[in-house]
Image: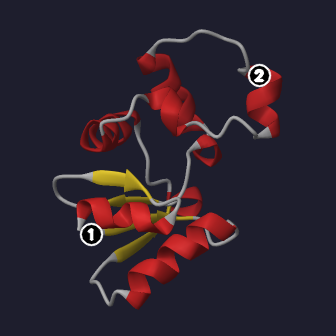
Amino acid sequence: MKIYHNPRCKKSRAGLQYLEEKKLDFTVVLYLKDEAFTEESLKALLKKSGKNPFEMIRTQEKEYKENYKGRELSDNEWIKIMAENPKFIHRPIIETDDNAVWGDPPTNIDKIL
């Protein structure tokens, strides 16, 4: 299991704490630092989650509002934007071999355990 984590994000820290409290075996991926996402890895992650790319976009980000708000883009275009701007991606994301879920609220994680 992996958690794609941003230590500066309150929601991401809550997801990490939730996993720790459950004493689960997982790997922390600091996706803003580790360049964890490529277009292909995002496609696979989205497929596991059952979400479309726009559902995983943080629309409150300043850069999103300035550059993308109101634009109608294809899924592939959103995936490319997410790969280039990982801070646009909702966090934390918890991934297993077969599933992925957005860990906000942290109890969402239970859906894939």
In this rendering, is residue 49 above or below 27? above
The image position of residue 111, as x and y in percent, is: 29, 59
Q: Residues within 10 Å of mark 1 (few under 14, many from 20)?
A: some
Cα–Cα span, label 2 and label 1 = 34 Å
Nearer the observer, 113 or 86: 113
Residue at x-position 78% and y-position 34%: 63
* Residue 49, above or below 71: below
- Number of disc labels: 2
Name which residue type carries label 1.
Answer: Met
Q: Image point 79% across, 28% down: which residue?
A: 65
Front residue of 49/107: it is 107
x, y percent for residue 37: 43, 47
Identified by mark 2, the residue type is Asn
- Residue pointed to by mark 1: 1
x and y, in percent, of residue 6 in the image: 60, 65
**Few, some or many residues within 10 Å of mark 2 (<14, 14–19, 20+):** few
Q: Residue at x 42, y 87 (%)?
A: 20
Quadrant housing the N terminus: bottom left
For marks 2 and 1, the one nearer the N-term is: 1
Which quadrant would residue 4 be assigned to in this image? bottom left
Q: Position of residue 79 (x, y in %)?
A: 46, 28
Position of the C terminus, as image quadrant, is bottom left
Q: Is residue 8 left or right of residue 48?
A: right
**In which quadrant of the rendered view does residue 72 lie?**
top right
| Element class at badge 2 | helix
Instruction: Check the image and tell me how it is coloured.
Output: secondary structure
Which label is found at residue 64?
none
Farthest top residue?
A: 72
Location of mark 2 (residue):
67
* Mark 1 secondary-structure assignment: loop
Identify which residue, 43 or 104, lies in the foreground: 104
Q: Residue at x 52, y 62 (%)?
A: 105
